[in-house]
Image (cartoon, rainbow, N blue to C red):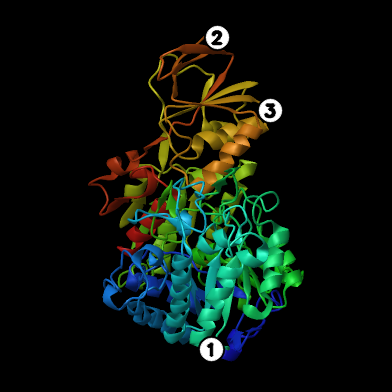
């Protein structure tokens, strides 16, 4: 697309698509793909960045992780082990600095080239995790003071003056490498509980020397890094900073007022200020804010902090934090709260979001659901992926190549796997029918969306409705198709995406009519004044979310689970606020408990440690124990149609991202 077209602002989003000056740079629009670790290898990380630049984002960040290695410890495939003989820095203080080694320059240059080829600008982010290191890297943690990160709970080595001076040099050289690689700017990471944030925070920085105390001394580390970097890159190379509040932004460490003061004090020393609150897990003084927050957090939760920062400084202000909707992004700019908007998860879900919006096709944007599957499975970091976009970080694998031979494809089951299989098959030129016993698209997520607390899931089926109509997919809804019907229809391929059926524990009395499933309840089955939600060994969100749903309807709820940790299969930034919500709504959570019987008077539960039993009178028992694959149709079709594939929960119940990925993969193989 020619540059003049790229810089034309559509009537619906005039501010979002207006250019912006940042020092000597002109960014083509206000949409930023801010830095985030992808966990990908070199080639996939480059391709991932390229797709988001090609999709129209104006500014893209390059993280020290995603395929660009060069920390003092643990070099990756693009950076051989450092040669310590010519290093001035010790491995103790240098460990963990992004872009530490000269061998990172070619990797950075490669990313700069692909970003520039698409008309976008790129910056590298320099950071050190300090006491908040997330990962099994050998060696001690380090920080300005011996204050443990609440989540990691490891006491760090308090840096001495010599080590701080080494870190200043290390940061400055990393910024130099970013400039030499041809990226357009650099950013110092001073948020999310990492090292620079620890220097800035009066909660984490307990020093009484020249590096801690009042704000002026807490700013010293940043100022010395800036001065050292300026001596290497000159006065014109833009260097920004990312900052954020501690805790709730009101009562501990860096408050919003303090955040604005930091931005004001830095003044013209930085080219921009990026505002991104929270920490890695959303755990600190109890549940706090995770910087990658779930749908439970309001959209744009950092906007108030950004507005305070913008009032305190004359440089451009960038804000991030659950801004996935174009209308919200436009309003943030229109109301003067910020000058740029970070939309990382929105661009993971749909990298073409900017181009679609510019072309007047905002209704075709695939929405992020805020499920946080893009970066974590439970407490474990994973390579970037997406619950709704199978091509995220798999751009080459998921390239849509037209089929050479159009086939008659019937997909049975209109949930995430089935809808994606139908869409991709139709995109490739196959003749596609999509059938489901329900009269609506969406499968289980559409039922879950009946819960007002999970209405975000409605966006999923809504997007597919438009796409499947555009592609001419024939919908056969409200009909539970049989194997005989499919055989008579003469399908070349049947994709079975019939999902799963509820797992029912084998306990006495389980057939009692007072025993219902979570999906029954969401579908409207009434529940009495007392409800027992049975999770058994289920580790994900099903049991606690239905418990909250019932509490919101006035029931007295107890959740029993045989697990020893709460919803441990869910990402920490999601399960911690959910646990807090249940506590606030009076839900009793009994871990290491199980249902042992349903009798005429109610339900009997047992403590699995002590084997003590108690009785819950007049309780409706709600099963949320997980599910079993419903592959009956596939077994009935074997040998009767030319080709049968089973995908999603019908193959094995897992997460939404697995269903989406399998639906896409089977369609690409047809």
Q: Quadrant of the C terminus?
A: bottom left
Q: Residue furthest front?
A: 209
C-alpha gap between disc 3 and disc 2: 21 Å
Q: Nearer the viewer, mark 3 or mark 1?
A: 1
Residue 227 horizontal side relative to residue 68, left or right:
right
116 or 439, nearer to the observer: 116
70 or 18, nearer to the observer: 70
Image position of 42 with respect to 487: above or below: below
Residue where numbered disc 1 is placed: 234
Instruction: Report crowding for label 1: few under 14, some 14 to 19, many 20 or more residues within 10 A (C-alpha).
Output: few
Image position of 589 with respect to 389: above or below: above
Q: Which disc number belongs to residue 554? A: 3
Instruction: Report crowding for label 3: few under 14, some 14 to 19, many 20 or more residues within 10 A (C-alpha).
Output: few
Residue at position x 56%, y 46% in the image: 284
Instruction: Report crowding for label 2: few under 14, some 14 to 19, many 20 or more residues within 10 A (C-alpha).
Output: few
Q: Which disc number belongs to residue 601? A: 2
Q: Secondary structure at mark 1?
A: loop
C-alpha gap between disc 1 and disc 2: 79 Å
Residue 501 visible to an observer of this rendering: yes
Residue 327 horizontal side relative to residue 2, left or right:
right
Residue 43, horizontal then vertical, whole percent: 33, 73
239 or 1, nearer to the observer: 239
Residue 531, horizontal then vertical, whole percent: 58, 23
Q: Secondary structure at mark 3?
A: loop
Q: Nearer the viewer, mark 1 or mark 2?
A: 1
Q: Quadrant of residue 453?
A: top right
- The mark that comes first in sequence, 3 or 1, is 1
């Amino acid at each position: 697309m020619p540059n003049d077209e790229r810089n034309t602002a559509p009537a619906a989003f005039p501010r979002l698509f207006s250019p912006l000056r940042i020092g000597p740079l002109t960014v083509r629009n206000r949409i930023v793909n801010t830095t985030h670790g992808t966990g990908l290898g070199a080639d996939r990380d480059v391709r991932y960045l390229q797709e988001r630049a090609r999709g129209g984002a104006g500014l893209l960040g390059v993280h020290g992780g995603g395929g660009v290695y060069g920390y003092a410890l643990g070099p990756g495939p693009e950076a051989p082990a450092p040669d310590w003989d010519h290093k001035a820095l010790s491995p103790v203080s240098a460990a963990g600095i992004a872009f530490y080694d000269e061998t990172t320059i070619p990797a950075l240059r490669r990313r700069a080239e692909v970003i520039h080829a698409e008309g976008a600008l790129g910056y590298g982010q320099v950071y050190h995790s300090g006491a908040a290191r997330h990962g099994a890297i050998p060696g001690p943690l380090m920080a300005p003071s011996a204050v443990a990160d609440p989540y990691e709970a490891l006491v760090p080595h308090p840096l001495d003056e010599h080590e701080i001076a080494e870190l200043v040099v290390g940061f400055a050289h990393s910024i130099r490498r970013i400039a030499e690689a041809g990226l357009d700017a650099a950013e110092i990471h001073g948020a999310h509980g990492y090292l620079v944030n620890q220097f800035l925070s009066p909660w984490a920085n307990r020093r009484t020397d020249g590096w801690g105390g009042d704000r002026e001394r807490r700013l010293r580390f940043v100022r010395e890094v800036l001065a050292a970097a300026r001596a290497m890159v000159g006065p014109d190379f833009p260097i920004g900073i990312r900052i954020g509040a501690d805790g709730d932004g009101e009562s501990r460490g860096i408050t919003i007022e303090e955040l604005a003061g930091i931005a004001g004090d830095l003044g013209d020393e930085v080219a921009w200020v990026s505002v991104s609150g929270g920490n890695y897990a959303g755990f600190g003084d109890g549940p706090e804010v995770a910087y990658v927050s779930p749908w439970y957090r309001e959209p744009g939760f950092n906007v108030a902090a950004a507005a305070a920062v913008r009032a305190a400084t004359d440089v451009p202000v960038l804000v991030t934090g659950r801004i996935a909707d174009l209308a919200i992004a436009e309003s943030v700019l229109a109301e003067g709260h910020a000058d740029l908007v970070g939309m990382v998860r929105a661009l993971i879900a749909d990298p073409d979001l900017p181009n679609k919006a510019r072309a007047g096709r905002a209704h075709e944007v695939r929405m992020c659901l805020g499920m946080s599957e893009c970066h974590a499975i439970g407490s474990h970091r994973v390579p970037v992926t997406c619950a709704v976009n199978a091509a995220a970080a798999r751009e080459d694998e998921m390239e849509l190549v037209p089929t050479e031979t159009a086939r008659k494809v019937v997909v049975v089951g209109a949930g995430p796997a089935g809808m994606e299989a139908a869409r991709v098959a139709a995109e490739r030129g196959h003749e596609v029918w999509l059938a489901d016993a329900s009269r609506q698209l969406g499968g289980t997520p559409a039922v879950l969306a009946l819960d007002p607390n999970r209405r975000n899931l409605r966006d999923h089926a809504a997007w597919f409705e438009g796409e499947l109509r555009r592609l001419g997919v024939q919908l056969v809804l409200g009909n539970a198709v049989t194997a005989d019907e499919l055989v008579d229809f003469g399908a070349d391929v049947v994709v079975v995406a019939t999902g799963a059926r509820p797992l029912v524990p084998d306990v006495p009395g389980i057939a009692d009519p007072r025993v219902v499933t979570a999906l029954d309840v969401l579908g409207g089955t009434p529940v009495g004044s007392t409800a027992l939600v049975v999770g058994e060994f289920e580790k994900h969100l099903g049991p606690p979310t239905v418990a909250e749903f019932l509490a919101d309807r006035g029931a007295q709820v107890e959740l029993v689970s045989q697990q020893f940790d709460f919803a441990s299969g869910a990402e920490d930034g999601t399960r911690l606020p959910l646990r807090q919500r249940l506590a606030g709504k009076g839900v009793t959570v009994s871990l290491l408990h199980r249902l042992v019987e349903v009798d005429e008077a109610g339900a009997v539960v047992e403590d699995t440690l002590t084997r003590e039993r108690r009785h819950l009178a007049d309780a409706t028992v709600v099963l949320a124990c997980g599910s079993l694959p419903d592959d009956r149709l596939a077994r009935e079709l074997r040998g009767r149609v030319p080709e049968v594939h089973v995908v999603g929960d019908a193959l094995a119940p897992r997460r939404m991202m697995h269903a989406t990925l399998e639906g896409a993969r089977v369609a690409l193989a047809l």
